[in-house]
Image: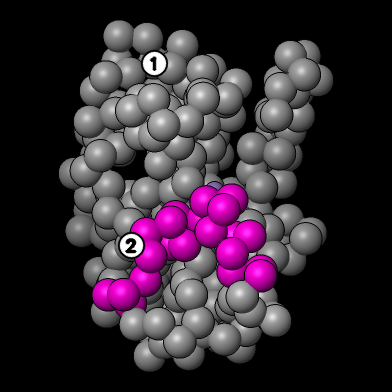
Amino acid sequence: MKQLIIGDIHGCHYELQQLIEKAGLGDDDEIIAIGDLFDRGPKPVEVYKFFRDTPNARAIMGNHEWKHIRANHGDLPPRFSILLTRWKFGDLYHELLGYIQTLPTYIDLPDALLVHGFIEPHIALAEQKRQIMLGTTSAEVRLQQEYEALWYTYYDGDKPVIVGHRDYSEAQQPFIYNDKVYGIDTRCVHGGALTGILLPDFEIISVPARRDYWGKIQRRHGAQ
Ligand SMILES: [Mn+2]
């Protein structure tokens, strides 16, 4: 069985379908998205319906999904990307919130650990703080304050970790550190590429974004 691990989709449904087609998956193979599935991009409802309706597709939570939960609880003023997703989902938004609440913070596969954000150095998996793994801004600031080097340079888990959230290459390319850390957020919604890793061989596949979707929205609305 193969598993296709997919980086930050951000509503890029066209590129998601292209990537899956390129992967050439069989009926028994599995698809796992590593967070930030919906906000900012053109087709978040279609991305949601794909994951809802595809039995062999699942996802973990990213900081954007977490923002929806917090905004819904009134803990966070909703920013433009959250409001736009709410508007696009309309009557389906309540169902989306229910789905988001089912998403795990990480998945520990036989071949790799999957997490959207970060792993705090020298701390066991079971003791990791949720916000570090989700990649919230405050958690990132704390990591930068407490550790001299970037978090991934300390990673010494017994299997590779696959993360999204940041473009560590700074060139919209997949990032590999010591064959232990795989960064696959290649900024599809900003006009980069959607990247996946096929397990168990760690084969990297990628499809280019059709355009800089979020840049266009930001220019039109002055959004962040
Ligand atoms: Mn993120």
Q: Is residue 202 visible?
A: no
- The residue wearing badge 2 is 106
Query: Which amino acid type corresponds to the residue marked 1 in the rendered image?
Result: Phe
- Do tag 1 and tag 2 residues touch (Cβ < 8 Å)? no
Q: Which mark is residue 89?
A: 1
Image quadrant in which you'd find residue 175? bottom right
Of the two numbered discs 1 and 2 on the same chain, state the one appearing first in sequence: 1
Residue 159 coordinates in the image, percent (x, y): 39, 85
Distance in Å between CA atoms under marks 1 and 2: 25 Å
Residue 112 seen in render: yes
Q: Is residue 101 above or below residue 30?
A: above
What residue appears at the point 27 percent right and 75 percent down from the top-left corner? 126
Give me the disc on residue 126. Answer: none
Q: Main secondary structure of the magenta part?
A: helix
Residue 80, compared with residue 53, is above or below; it is above
Mark 2: give few (<14), some (14-19) or many (20+) Cα within 10 Å: many
The N terminus lies in quadrant: bottom left
Q: Is residue 106 magenta?
A: no
User: Of the residues shown, which amino acid type is indicated by label 2?
Assistant: Tyr
> Measuring 27% from the left and 47% from the top, which residue is drawn there?
103
Q: Residues within 10 Å of mark 1 (few under 14, many from 20)?
A: some
- Find residue 17 and report its horizontal and vertical position in percent: 46, 39
Q: Does mark 1's beta carbon lie closer than 8 Å to ligand 1?
A: no
64, 30: nearer the viewer:
64
Q: Secondary structure at mark 1?
A: helix
- Give the residues in magenta: 125-145
